[in-house]
Amino acid sequence: MLIRACQDRALSEAAGCLLAAVRTTPCVAQNTLDVRARRPQIKIKDTKRQAAREARLAAVEIRAASVTLRPPPRPDRKLPAVTINVVLVEEVDPPAGETPIQWLLITTLPIGDVQQVLLIVQYYCIRWQIEVYFRTLKSGCRVESRYFERVGRLQNCLAVYSIVAWKILYLCRLSRECPDLDCEVVFEPAEWKAVYLAVGKRKLPKTPPSLNEMVRMIASLGGYVIRKST
């Protein structure tokens, strides 16, 4: 489990809270994070997670600790206390007018050494790509619409579609980061030529098209509209 805490939590050991307790621990590592620019989709949104910000490199300090959360009261029973690991990532010197980066990460992953702590931070940094991967798996491959009589058949289907979703995500990212790359880096000549003839309906070029052009051609087979401005 690896989640980002939205609210501070009370601890069982003393009359303290989670954020303050982790801040008292020594810094185990320092790192630099690539913070992307953000524009709020709704202008009236001004919360810390949705406020506008400029792109920057953020120098952060990383702390880690194991804590026991105070269980919430229940009228009919007493809930057990839960011990979890916490990783705190805080920006040291944010630019003027910018909200400092602060991630309070709750996890069941080990934090025994610095490398394990840094791995947790790395996992959280790629959280959006994980979301896109599962969106591709559910919306693109439509795995939730597959019905089988046996669980084994569903597992086989998921195994195949997991590879398909990874390949789609890989191609999309590569075509955006290296749009002018030769498409034969990824596609065999027979593959891109078949797509080119089916979509372009014109004579094959003497040199292979770019990767970005080929990915857009493949996307057009699923309904994507190729425009000159894209």
Image: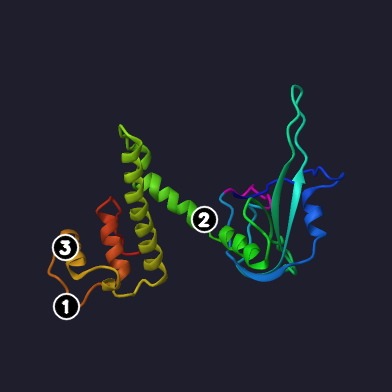
Q: Residues within 10 Å of mark 2 (few under 14, many from 20)?
A: few
Tell me residue 206's x, y (percent). Answer: 16, 77
Residue for badge 2: 128
Assign a secondary structure to mark 1. Answer: loop
Name the N-terminal-most of marks 2 and 1. 2
Kind of residue sitting beneath label 1: Lys
Assign a secondary structure to mark 3. Answer: helix
Tell me residue 4's x, y (percent). Answer: 64, 51
Q: Is residue 15 above or below residue 40?
A: above
In the rendered structure, which segment of residues is drawn in magenta? 42-48
Residue at the image position 22 percent from the left and 74 percent from the top? 208
Residue for badge 1: 206
Kind of residue sitting beneath label 3: Ala
Kind of residue sitting beneath label 2: Trp
Q: Is residue 113 left or right of residue 146?
A: right
Tell me residue 216's x, y (percent). Answer: 30, 61
